[in-house]
Image (cartoon, rainbow, N blue to C red):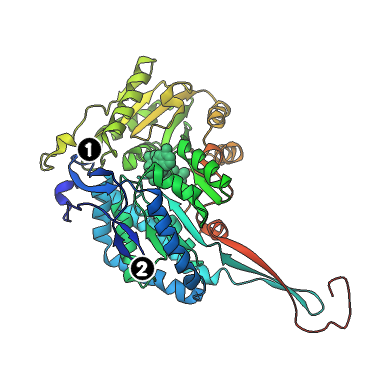
Amino acid sequence: MGLNNIKIQKDFGKLKNWIGNKEVESKATQYMDLTTPYTGEVIGQVPMGTTADVAEAAKVAKAAFKVWSNTNIKERVQVMFKLKALMERDFEELKQLVSLENGKTLAEAHGDVAKAIEVLEFGCSIPNKVYAPMLEVSNGIYCQVIKEPVGVVASIVPFNFPIMCPMWTIPIALTVGNTMILKPSEQVPLGAIKLAKLLKEAGLPDGVLNVVHGGVDVVNAICDNTDIKALSFVGSTKVAKIVYGRAAMAGKRVLALGGAKNHLILMPDANPETAPSQIVDSAMGCAGQRCMAASVMVAVGNCDKHIEGMVAYAKSIKLGEKLGTVINKQSVERINNYITAAEKMGAKVLVDGRNQKPENSDIKGLEGGYWVGATLLDNVSPDMPAGCEEIFGPVLSIIRVNTIEEALKIENNNPYGNAASIFTTSGANAQYLFRNANAGMNGINVGVPVPREPFGFGGWNDSKFGNGDLTGDQGIDFWTQDRKITTKFIEPQVRNWMS
Ligand code: NAD
């Protein structure tokens, strides 16, 4: 692993928007340097787009909607089948792009692309799922429901999964007939451009998928644009709340997924051979930058043996090999500050990831990279910032309690609600968790309980604003509206109140 193993272009120049299936220069007056987190090296410039960029994309998407929504779904889905073949053809390049722009290890980047393809496979199955139910409700009178696209939609995504997060929405929203504006994170715009180019190659007509680069101004313009009828957002809770409110006020259908502080409960009866590494992997994988990462581990009773195993395993995780970088310099500082503050407040730093760099000297320029090593904090209390706030780094805070009831009380009190897991060999403990946890996605001996397709993805509480899940069947519901049709094909013999 490492930047030296990334064998792709490393200078992307001034990036352009993607509108009407071609590159279009942004109307931005400001550009942001795009860096690779491995070294801090500049690899391109991202336009900080404007309201005018969004208006241009929306106009093109609106015109494309007329044609695309009237294209039969069995024809639309062929583009998705071709996209799958193309993503598999270019799997290696996609992986390398993700690694380059996001700092994931190549193995983690593999996971990002593989999960994206899994959602795409679900998208390919949609024509077999959305056929219309019909019932003869009175003699000769039929009621029917048809799922129709909502129009021009938008998808705003975060930095942590450059391919998967866009692909949570693209295959579903487009297959059901919408046209889309995708707003990638300005920190990882390259994956989105590659996806747009692959979709063109797969035969997607002009204007069906458009990419507008930028930050706050583009997001605000998307929320306000009246041609855009529905919007999904994935990112931090702070911004999810803003976007949810602003877009809903503008009359849009909105689903906004936010941040998380996931609790994992360790029982003394958990398997001591497997639980320690699984728990540490949940917290440290993707450098802790997963909305499903374990962030707090509540150890119930005497779990010292397991915690010793966790310390040994965490110390064996080599930076630059099994652990990639975090996204930027500010993240390194934020994460280090959480560790230092917890230490000052009485937490014990069992494994310290501050000021670490990879030992692997073949990664040139790594001194400038955004590295934080695996960190384990013990004796954290729920009111310390490390015990209750989203750190979004490779840090696991251990809170010690005596009973499972106390553990669930701590979990219940946190405002988020993405994931909650338990490690135990007791069915009763497992059941206690999923009857009482205040989180939408639960794991029993699973550290990262992401539901795989066809199950939908979505948390509760401050981890999600809006109704339903983003993927799975509820994703289809979100990107469609039901048309209810009542038909009288023949004059009924018996007249009643419907005649
Ligand atoms: P972020 O909220 O900073 O950014 C997300 C998107 O919003 C980006 O496209 C960004 O350009 C835009 N944005 C940023 N600040 C904005 C503002 N003030 N107004 C309007 N738009 C703004 O999130 P991030 O740092 O890119 O991603 C990490 C966060 O995403 C974490 O909190 C993580 O938990 C969360 N996340 C959640 C899920 C989930 O499914 N719940 C999945 C992935 C990531």
Residue 448 visible in the shown view: no
Q: Position of residue 496 (x, y in %)?
A: 88, 74
Q: Nearer the viewer, residue 283 or 187?
A: 187
Above or below, comparing residue 121 to residue 296 in the picture = below
Q: Quadrant of residue 118?
A: bottom left
Q: Position of residue 18 (x, y in %)?
A: 33, 60
Q: Distance between the residues labelled 2 and 1?
A: 34 Å
Q: What residue type is labelled 1?
A: Leu
Residue 56 located left or right of residue 382:
left
Q: In which quarter of the image is ligand 1?
A: top left
Q: Which dot marks residue 241?
A: none
Above or below, comparing residue 265 to residue 494 in the picture = above
How many badges with numbers are in the image?
2
- Disc 1, SS: loop
The residue at the point 54 percent across, 61 percent down is 476
Q: Which amino acid does label 2 sit on?
A: Leu
**Residue occupied by mark 2:** 83
Sequence-wise first label, 2 or 1: 2
**Residue occupied by mark 1:** 319
**Which quadrant would the C terminus be assigned to in this image?**
bottom right
- Disc 2, SS: helix
Q: Is ligand 1 less than 8 Å from the beta carbon at label 1?
A: no
Neighbourhood count class around disc 1 (C-alpha, 10 Å): few under 14, some 14–19, many 20 upward: many
Q: In which quarter of the image is residue 293?
A: top left
The residue at the point 53 percent across, 27 percent down is 410
Residue 75 located left or right of residue 97:
right
Q: Where is residue 420 in the image (x, y as percent from the top left)?
A: 50, 38
The residue at the point 38 percent across, 57 percent down is 116
Q: In which quarter of the image is residue 497?
A: bottom right
Residue 359 located left or right of residue 65:
left
Above or below, comparing residue 493 to residue 381 in the picture = below
Q: Position of residue 145 (x, y in %)?
A: 66, 68
